[in-house]
Amino acid sequence: MKPGRIILIVIGSLLVLAGLCAAAGAAALGLLAAAQRGGYLSVPEETYSVGSYALTSESIEVSPGVTAEDNVASVQLRGTNPNGELFLGIAPEADVERYLAGVAHTELEDVRFDPFAADYRELPGTATPAPPGEQDFWAASSAGTGTREIEWPLQQGEWTVVVMNADAAPQVTAELQAGVRSDLVGPFAWSLLIAAAVLVLGGTALILAGILTGRNQPGGPAGGYAGPEGGHGPYGYAKPPRPAPAPASVPVPYPAKLYGELDPGLSRWLWLVKWLLAVPHYFLLVFLWTAFCVATVIAGFAVLFTARYPRALFDFNVGVIRWSWRVGFYATQVLGTDRYPPFTLERTDYPADFDVAYPERLSRGLVLVKWWLLVIPHALIVGAFTGGGYVVVRQAGPFGGWERSVGGGWDDPVYGTGWTDWTEGPQSVGGWTAGISLIGLLVLVAAAVLLFTGRYPRPLFDFIMGLRRWAYRVLAYTALMRDEYPPFRLDQGPVDARDLQAGDWTGVPANRGHPRSEAG
């Protein structure tokens, strides 16, 4: 993949991520605007009680340049004194400090709700204050019996809220509720929404430009087999002779191929740092998988309306999975080679490869249900050996739960389950439960045997490959690449033996020779 195309995809992915963040902000502001419609956003009413002469807030700082006429926001304070008359007021901090100088009063430092708790700071003094209603520095104030209320538009300066008994007596008890509203929330929400749309559309355009520009023979079949019979395609892979129709007894190969050959002479200790050496790949794959998501959504609509998966998007998405599989095979998912993965979406002679045969037509109806509904049986099985119930929670996501947050679950196609599978358990609907990923444990066992004996157990490697092959077939199906339902079987070894029986060498690098006969 050329650097210019990667740069376009990275920039486009950053714009899409920024757009999604802006959309989330717009949604949050929209909810706030709807909640404050016709009123204030208020905290619960609670009883505050202090033994001093006054209860004050911490300093409220408003930025310079903000005036009451700007209508940036308004603050509301409501209160009731069950024992008599209540005074509520807000004034410049300096004036309040002069008024309460030498007077014992209490500053409210922090409030927590559900359950309610308030933290106070006592400020000692011996003086007796004059009644607060006699002061002329209040920006807003209210005094009397029953429910008192003040509203104050924000304006520049440092301000303090004061709650007292109207007669300035000690022992202040009040049921208080504070609220805020801003007429700017709605316009800000619309502005963020427009910005989000621009960022997502612009980022998507850049991603598609990176995917679609400079394609090598875009009309060729999957995997680059565009050369003459028995020759080589543009990526250097031998094209096998066209096989004759297979007898009924020969199984039909699944069109998603996962290949991985165990290299001899693996280092005993290199697996300890491979995850660190692969960090440059992880960085790029974050953006490539963002582009993968965008491309899959676009392809889904294309299939829905045209029954065809756009070839350039298909090749790109297969390439992203291929790149991820190579990194996983090297660093976390298998540890099957010490050869550093190449930075490319295209096929190479690397000992791990992934390929999907391009479908000429796809079902319009299946595209609506296969990525979230039809995949559930496989989700339960694959989730069982890659991290458990997490998939049940996440399967309703845009790719059937293949996107992953912290914790066990689906194989993460970008990073692999890796080391986290050995310590993080599955996630259930009710919360976190303890557990160990089967496939992560198997890789750990293989690594330990390699460390102490210098050999990677071949039967264990074949079994791990079978589990990975199952998971990647489901991934290809979930990502809308094929309509054929993935088989419920564990095809072990470097390559599926059923493919070899059918004469299908797709996915096996030509210069690595015939796949091992014991692959199955």
Image (cartoon, helix red, strand yellow):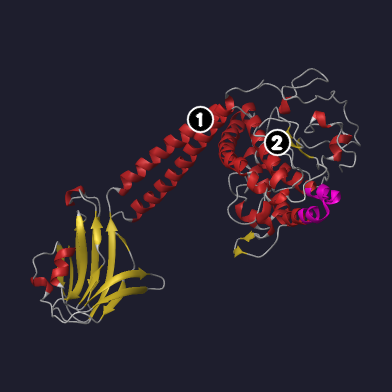
Find residue 51 and report its horizontal and vertical position in percent: 24, 82
Q: Nearer the viewer, mark 2 or mark 1?
A: 1
Q: How many marks?
A: 2
Q: Residue at x 61, y 63 (%)?
A: 432
In the image: residue 363, left or right of residue 288: right
Span shown in magenta: 446-464
In the image: residue 179, left or right of residue 3: left
Which residue bears the numbered disc 1? 206
- Reply yes or no: does residue 460 show up in magenta: yes
Q: Quadrant of the C terminus?
A: top right
Circle on res. 482: 2
User: First in sequence: mark 2 or mark 1?
Assistant: 1
Q: Considering depth in this image, is 212 or 359 the residue closer to the camera? A: 212
Q: Considering depth in this image, is 338 or 354 the residue closer to the camera? A: 338
- Mark 2 → mark 1, Cα distance in angstroms: 26 Å
Looking at the picture, does residue 100 appear above or below residue 316? below
Q: Secondary structure at mark 2?
A: loop
Q: Residue at x 46, y 32 (%)?
A: 202
What's under tag 2, amino acid-wise? Arg
In the image: residue 515, left or right of residue 114: right
Q: Residue at x 62, y 49 (%)?
A: 401
Q: Secondary structure at mark 1?
A: helix
Find residue 465 and report its horizontal and vertical position in percent: 78, 46
